Amino acid sequence: AGLRRAAPGLAVEVRVLGRDEAVRAVLTGAADLALVTGAAAPSDPLPLPDAGPMITRAAAEEPLAVLLPASHPLAGRPALRLTDLADARWIDAPDTAVPLAELRAAARSDGFEAQVTYGGTDLRGLGMLVAAGHGLAALAPGVAEGLAGTVAVRVSAPRLVHRTEIVHPRDPDEPVRALVAALTG
């Protein structure tokens, strides 16, 4: 909002894309910057596709959580170990939640198999699938707030965060630099 007040003629277009598509949009010049999310060890960068001549900067880190149906037997716990859920039913929603391949890598497990694959970016749709018992999903607890019929339980081990990064060209124009500063300031 501050940037728009400082530059009232600035036109802004917001698009919701999957992570790989968002990175490609910046790489090809179709977007000036992208916000991408995923799971990582604290302070580690996200595992992104080859970003070419781009810069990534941390914008936020939150504890990672597992989204469970509110009726799930583990829904009342304060925290869960990710490895204990390797054989659970999972929803692979790589454009909405942490991709299951990242959970497998983080937990060093062959588990985390998809029972349902969700190709959308609508968080409420994913929440409805979880609430209906079709599987679990991993995301930030703040993202899960307000998803009816679900509970987000923090992951205690391995130590992971839900990280948001800004992806932009190496030499962005001034409005992009100002937006990056506002998002990271």
Image: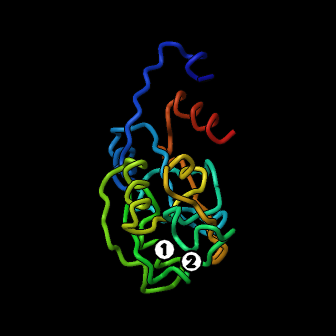
Above or below residue 138? Residue 141 is above
Residue pictured at 50% horizontal, 31% vertical: 173
Say what secondary structure mark 1 lies in. helix
The image shows residue 178 at horizontal and vertical percentages of 59, 30
- Residue type, numbered disc 2: Leu
Closer-to-camera residue (118/1): 118
Above or below residue 107? Residue 123 is above
The image shows residue 84 at horizontal and vertical percentages of 55, 83
Q: Locate residue 19: give its quadrant.
A: bottom left
- Residue type, numbered disc 1: Leu
Residue pictured at 42% horizontal, 61% vertical: 130
Residue pictured at 57% horizontal, 49% vertical: 145
* The N terminus, quarter of image: top right
Residue pictured at 56% horizontal, 59% vertical: 151
On residue 103, which mark appears? Answer: 1
Q: Earlier in the sequence, mark 1 or mark 2?
A: 2
Cβ atoms under marks 1 and 2 closer than 8 Å: yes
Viewer can see residue 169: no
The image shows residue 26 at horizontal and vertical percentages of 39, 44
Measured in 3D between alpha carbons, the distance from the residue under mark 1 to the one under mark 2, in whole angstroms, is 8 Å
Say what secondary structure mark 2 lies in. helix
**Residue 89 placement, left or right of 166:** left
**Residue 21 placement, left or right of 160:** left
Closer-to-camera residue (49/126): 126
* The C terminus, quarter of image: top right
Above or below residue 39? Residue 105 is below
Q: How many badges with numbers are in the image?
A: 2
The image shows residue 11 at horizontal and vertical percentages of 43, 21
Viewer can see residue 100: yes
On residue 82, which mark appears? Answer: 2
